[in-house]
Amino acid sequence: MKQQVQKHKLARDKKVSNQPALKVEDLRTYFFTREGVVRAVDGINFEIYPNEAFGLVGESGCGKSMTALSILRLVPPPGKIMGGKVYLRDHNLMASDYDEICSLRGNRISIVFQDPMTYLNPVFRIGDQIAEGLLIHQNISREEAWKRSVELMESVRIVDAADRAKDYPFQFSGGMRQRVMIAMAIANDPELIILDEPTTALDVTIQAQIMDLVRDIQGEHGMGVLLITHDLGVVADLCQRVAVMYAGKIVELAKIEPLFETPRHPYTIGLFNSLPRLDQRRSRLTTIEGQPPNLARLPKGCSFAIRCSVARPDCISTPQELREVDPGHWVRCWLVE
């Protein structure tokens, strides 16, 4: 894993603007259920800069995808955004009305979802579906939009794009459909693109191709990227900084090299210890014992304390804030000095 981080270090060390493309402040999204209030996103903070890829990682149910939906104001009921601010440049998305947020989605901020077949309309041609976003946000003719759709398909390396634009989603492979989703996302040259588990259902070879494509597109357009994934290898391949989420909170945030070389939070350490290593002989993989907590019945202190092998009494009883333990390295843990 460390070799993979070093391999792509030069590709990631690009000049980053000082003004964030996206700034998230104390974002909180709760679901009101019969069982209680589920704190799916519970006061998270981070920034993403132009030309930067920022990773958001954690196990299923930790709040990664709900963070993306909250940023875009797409939280399904009974969920509700309870507080916080999300700035796209100087525009607070949480204060935007319905028309404003619709004008921003797919234009200044875009998302690529995990399963493209769920979001592509099976009865419309691929070219028409890409053109739709162009017609909504740009003052161009349908003929111009179709021509631009073909160009976008070519930019994401779809062969024979002029002919394939006339095809339907079922005629594309999983990797090709994901390329179509990326073409739709970059159509209006957004300032930020969100990738929500973009390679989960793809084989390793196709995953690498998609990540190479994202890296090339980001270098060409200079956009910020929010990569949501549980795959630490994909994060090492693309991102400059990464935040680790657990039970709706960020428990560690750092640049990619220090996080991979010296993780500080017990949960992050557990994630790395559970990965297979070619340079180490182990009879079995290390696991993190126990289950994630019920988000409707979170403990008073650290949410990871019940699974943590080094927890002490104050970990269970007293909440800990995210604090900077090294320059740019933030950790939510009592045990880190």
Image: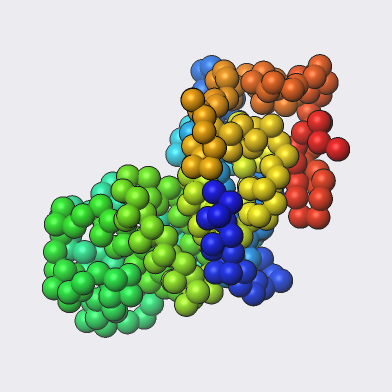
Applied colour scheme: rainbow
Q: Is residue 97 visible?
A: no
Observer-nearest of 24 and 94:
24
Q: Is residue 198 left or right of residue 24?
A: left
Observer-nearest of 171 and 39:
171
56 versus 133 height, above or below: above
Q: Is residue 14 left or right of residue 275?
A: right
Q: Quadrant of residue 144?
A: bottom left
Q: Is residue 244 left or right of residue 228?
A: right
Please provide percent x and percent y for residue 286: 55, 27
State the residue at coordinates (31%, 62%): 179
43 versus 180 height, above or below: above
Observer-nearest of 247 and 132:
247
82 versus 334 height, above or below: below
Q: Residue furthest right?
A: 337
Please provide percent x and percent y for residue 200: 37, 45
State the residue at coordinates (65%, 35%): 269
246 versus 209 height, above or below: above
Q: Is residue 337 visible?
A: yes
State the residue at coordinates (61%, 72%): 14
Please provide percent x and percent y for residue 20: 66, 66
State the residue at coordinates (63%, 48%): 260
Q: Quadrant of residue 62?
A: top right
Please provide percent x and percent y for residue 238: 52, 59
The image quadrant where one finds the C terminus is top right
